[in-house]
Each structure stands twice: as structure tokens, then as C-alpha cells.
Image: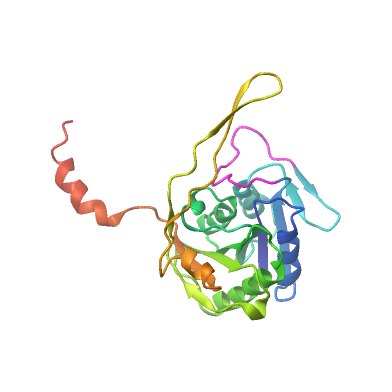
Amino acid sequence: MLRVLISNDDGVYAKGIMTLAKAIKKIADHVDVVAPDRNRSGASNSLTLTAPLHLKTLENGFVSVEGTPTDCVHVAITGLLKTVPDMVVSGINASANLGDDVWYSGTVAAAMEGRFLGLPAIALSLASEKCEHYDTAAQVACELIQHILHEPLPAATILNVNVPDVPFEELRGYEVTRLGTRHCAAPTIRQIDPRGHEVYWVGPAGAEQDAGMGTDFYAIRQGKVSITPLRIDLTHYEAFDVLSSWVKRLKV
């Protein structure tokens, strides 16, 4: 019996999550969809702690949550579902999550929450602004799920997967990649609203900086599916020696 929990950050009504659920139902014995009631892109790993979470079951069986992607996965695994799923799949996000994007991505955060709670997890994004070929990303997800069942992921690891927006047969393969980086984001945009109040819009993400061979940016430009293993443990072990040498000189 394979049970899969699906969530996202684009909202429970998004085309990506509907396409993904339809595809995974063909290979899984049971699929639960628990997702935000509206678009929560950029929510990152935020968890609602100061208000109750209101849930609603829709006619198609999806569960809508007035909360963040992390809320959705957390409440599903720790109380909503009678049986804990075997895996969490987050997506299909309507645009790429490449490089520095992962720090802000609700799609990636939903997968991370699944991993925090002990389950293998995949974050899936369609690397395009137009987003025409959700079926391609859904098919990639099914391929990866079946491989993970036979060869489990390393502990404390999720897969951040970006898929070119082309028909499946036009994909040029799969590539294991590292995160690229972007230049600093564009400046915040100051405006005056109709009531005369000063408001600010966060500027667009920066252009590609480190986007050479081996990065997720590069793989997408080559028409390949980018698979980046993300480690949940953020500890920078390589810095231990440097820190140990000067921490001794700190005054208590």
C-alpha cells in the first residue's frame, strides 16, 4: 500500500496540484491532498502559532487549509490523517524554484516539513512563466516516486526538482545538480496607494549569478530535469575548526 500526501503553495485550486494528484493516483493506493486555501507563494517555512487552523473538505476530496504550506503538511501528518502517509510530494509549482529561491519557497517548505516529520519528500516545480506542460512534471514525479520506493533517499534529505516546460518526450534527460545563486534582488518599489499611504512592493528576484555547469539553472537551460538534493541539517560543519580557534578568545 502506497500512501502519498500532496501539498503546494499555489493553493488548493491550482492547476498544478490537480494535475499532480490525478497522475499520482495511477501509481498510489491512496492519495491525500491538503493545501492552502489560496496562493501562499513565498511563505517559506512559516508555521501558524497564534491562531487556529480552519479546514474545509472540498467536493473533490481535497482539504483546504487557511494556513501556510508548512501548516498543511504539519496538520495532515500530526492529526488530520488517520494513517500516516509514506511520502510527501509538494507541487507542481507554477514557476521555477532554482538557486536562492529555495529559501523563500513554500513549495520547498512543504517538502521540508514532511522530512522533518520523518517522511521522504519531493518539491516539484515547472520551470516556466507560461506553465503549459504540467503533465510533464507530473510524469517526472511518478518516475521519481517509484525509484524512491526501491532506493530510499539519504536521511534528512529532500529532492528539489525543476522540470522544463516542454512535452515529456522532449526532455533531454535528468541531471543531479547543485543550487546556483542569483545576484541581489532588485530594489524595493515605493508607491503611494489611492488613499495617499506609502506602500512598498518587494522587487523582482536577481538575475542568475552562479549558473554554470553543474547548477540547477544550467540543467534547465539544457532542457534537462534538475534534481537537487537538499540537506535539512543546516549546520556548516566545515566552519567548526575556524570557530573553535577564535571562540576560545571570547570573553565570558
Position of 73 with respect to 22 (left or right) is left
Does 64 appear above or below 1?
Answer: above
Q: Could you say which quadrant of the image residue 215 lies in?
A: bottom left
Residue 199 in percent (x, y) is at: 60, 26
Q: From the image, give the main secondary structure of the stretch colored magenta.
A: loop
Picture coordinates of residue 167, whole percent (x, y):
68, 75
- Residue 24: image quadrant is bottom right
Confirm whether residue 209 shows in the render. yes
Looking at the rendering, the stretch of residues picked out in magenta corresponds to 39-54
Number of numbered discs present? Answer: 0
Say if 210 sits above or below 173 in the image: above
Q: Would residue 208 be counted in the magenta stretch?
A: no
Q: Residue at x 18, y 41 (%)?
A: 247
Query: Is residue 44 rendered magenta in the image?
Result: yes
Q: Is residue 28 left or right of residue 116?
A: right
Q: Which quarter shows the N terminus?
A: bottom right
State the residue at coordinates (65%, 33%).
51
Of residues 252 and 205, the one nearer the viewer is 205
Q: Is residue 35 above or below residue 1?
A: above
Toward which corner of the image does residue 7 lie, by quadrant?
bottom right
Image location of residue 155, percent across then percent down:
44, 65
